[in-house]
Image (tube, helix red, strand yellow):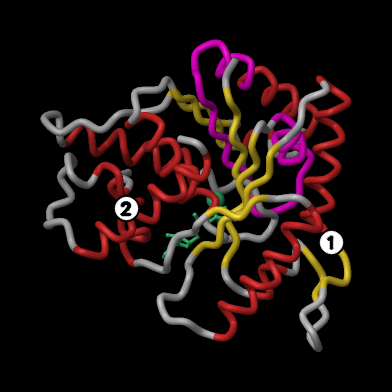
Amino acid sequence: MSRIFVIGNEKGGAGKTTCAMHLISALLDQGYKVASIDTDLRQLSLTNYIKNRELYNQKNPDKLVPQPCHFYLTTKGENDEDANLLLFEQKLCDARNLAEYIVIDTPGYHSLLSKLAHSYADTIITPINDSFMDLDVMAKINPDDLSIISPSIYSQMVWEQKMQRAARDQSSIEWIVMRNRLSQIDAVNKRNVGYVLEKLAKRISFKIAPGFSERVVFRELFLYGLTLLDLTTANLGKPLALSHVAARQELRDFLTCLGI
Ligand SMILES: Nc1ncnc2c1ncn2[C@@H]1O[C@H](COP(=O)(O)OP(=O)(O)OP(=O)(O)O)[C@@H](O)[C@H]1O
Ligand SMILES: [Mg+2]
């Protein structure tokens, strides 16, 4: 049985693709057979990340980095939702036949395909930027006392997919939220978001994983198809800096929380 991670958040730019690629790289690093599926039909960011990784390997045959078996759905069928749902289930079936772990990246918008992908998760990972505007897709918050008024659109969608999953095969979905692009200084906003997330975690049942700080390295690596875990062996063309080492430690803490 493969374990399926779905990286999701309806809010765009939360760090889903960055998180997906680092998770894939971590699992490959540990010698697992990994498949990845890109369900972001328009951007195909994970697919392009993996293509950049392939180009890196072609240019650096002496310092190869491991690759997942990657599947993507093409934009040709963008407007044919039924065809996409069917295609997704076929690709998932193929991925299950060859991988111990499957990592699925989803788009930053609501779609039937994204909902279906969520319903197959063993673990949903939701990166969230440390901002109340980003938190708005998870819960409505009272600005006067930071109390939770109600769960919001994305939390409701995850809840519905947990029900779908239970109805399909009586299994449960674990939900993990990770704070991304954390400020490295202690600001009131950071503390307040942390406080609300802790309360929300108890109310709607998710686990909070240690997150990633705001770091330039995450933005540079895409072009080379590399991740923080590749930096000791791969050729990035510059020495490993202290911030890279600190970022790698954050990544390790995150992976430990996932049980990897
Ligand atoms: N911890 C971080 N520090 C700095 N930049 C980051 C960090 N995480 C992600 N980024 C940058 O933020 C942007 C959004 O990240 P990413 O594309 O992974 O988000 P996404 O949720 O997949 O977006 P979309 O919803 O559009 O698919 C990218 O430019 C990425 O390089
Ligand atoms: Mg993305």
Q: Is residue 50 magenta?
A: no
Q: Which residues are magenta?
A: 92-120
Q: Nearer the viewer, residue 110 or 76?
A: 110
Q: Is residue 129 left or right of residue 220?
A: right
Label 1 CB-ligand 1 distance < 8 A: no
Mark 1 → mark 2, Cα distance in angstroms? 33 Å
Q: Nearer the viewer, residue 148 or 221?
A: 148
Q: Position of residue 65 (x, y in %)?
A: 25, 33
Q: Is residue 175 left or right of residue 64?
A: right
Q: Nearer the viewer, residue 46 or 21?
A: 21
Q: Which residue is painted at 27% across and 36% down in the image?
A: 55
Q: Is residue 24 left or right of residue 246?
A: right
Residue 184 placement: quadrant: bottom left
In this view, 197 is above or below 223:
below
Residue 238 placement: quadrant: bottom left
Q: Quadrant of the C terminus?
A: top left
Q: Quadrant of the N terminus?
A: top right
**Which numbered disc, 1 or 2, marks the residue that appears first in the sequence?**
1
Q: Position of residue 109 (x, y in %)?
A: 70, 53
Q: Which residue is mark 1?
A: 151
Give neighbour class at mark 1: few <14, some 14-19, many 20+ (Cα, 10 Å). some
Considering the numbered disc 2 on the image, is that residue within a helix, a strand or a loop? helix
Residue type pointed to by label 2: Arg
In this view, 91 is above or below 205:
above
Q: Is residue 95 magenta?
A: yes
> Looking at the rendered structure, which numbered label has been put on residue 248?
2
For the view shown, which residue lies furthest in the bottom direction?
Answer: 144
Considering the numbered disc 1 on the image, is that residue within a helix, a strand or a loop? strand
Q: Which residue is painted at 59% across and 82% down in the image?
A: 189
Residue type pointed to by label 1: Pro
Give neighbour class at mark 2: few <14, some 14-19, many 20+ (Cα, 10 Å). some
Q: Which residue is painted at 55% across and 31% down in the image?
A: 37
